[in-house]
Image: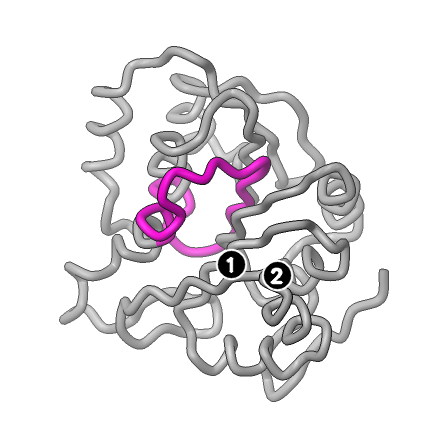
Amino acid sequence: MSLPTTDAGVRLNPALNAAEIDMYSVLLSKTRSVVDFGDPGSTLLAVRHRVKQLFSVQPNPQQLAVLRAIQQISEAEREDRVRFIQPDIGRTNARNKPVDKKRRDDWPLYYTQLWNELQGIIPDLVYINGVFPLATALEALAHIGPGTQLLLVGGLKHRRQEALQNFCDLTSSVGSLAVYRPRKNYDNELRQELLGAIRYNRRA
């Protein structure tokens, strides 16, 4: 699937290699509802696969404006197939990394606000690629179940895999893209403890 690479300085290709895009595309083709903690490119890819419901976290107003200027995105938003969540975490860079340390207390909104707005909706798939990756995954676990696939770019890195294996099973991987399935039962106190230790860590 051909995607533009830039528009007004915003990358519109997913931050994945070709094999990872192929794997994600196969999963999207079998998925009805997606939560996207990714980049503009991953949002556009999901829309082009016509998932029934996409929830995309976009804290960068400039990137969101570029997305909404794309016809397929604007049509999907009008048809209520895509919904954007815009956490106010202060100024961010092109990778959605918050850079204003005076707003540090607001940073966890990146990975918590969406779940408050979903009001109990459980997605089929959660895609994570960017800032706060492990914190985003640990928070997601509180809102999903064994029927949800958790896709984490960089999910095979030792610290992330070591943490997630307490709560999930690794079902497949390609390149840096790892697919996890949450277990039905796990130690939620441990999950909360691990999350508390990294809640402001933008790279963990």
Mark 1, secondary structure of its residue = strand
In depth, the one of 40 and 84 nearer the eye is 84
The C terminus - image quarter: top left
Amino acid carrying label 1: it is Ser
* Type of colouring: one colour
For this orientation, the residue located farthest to the top is 185
Q: Residue at x 42, y 62 (%)?
A: 85
Q: Position of residue 93 (x, y in %)?
A: 41, 74
In depth, the one of 52 and 126 nearer the eye is 52
For this orientation, the residue located farthest to the front is 79
Instruction: Evaluate whether residue 200 shows in this view.
Output: yes
For this orientation, the residue located farthest to the bottom is 8
Q: Position of residue 53 (x, y in %)?
A: 60, 51
Q: Residue at x 62, y 59 (%)?
A: 81
Q: Is residue 17 left or right of residue 98?
A: right
Range covered by the magenta-colored residues: 114-135
**Residue beneath label 1, please?**
56
- For marks 1 and 2, give the CA distance: 7 Å
Q: Is residue 45 above or below residue 91?
A: above
**In the rendered structure, are the residues bearing label 1 and label 2 in contact, judged by CB atoms less than 8 Å apart?**
yes
Q: Is residue 40 magenta?
A: no
**Residue beneath label 2, please?**
43
Q: Is residue 108 left or right of residue 69?
A: left
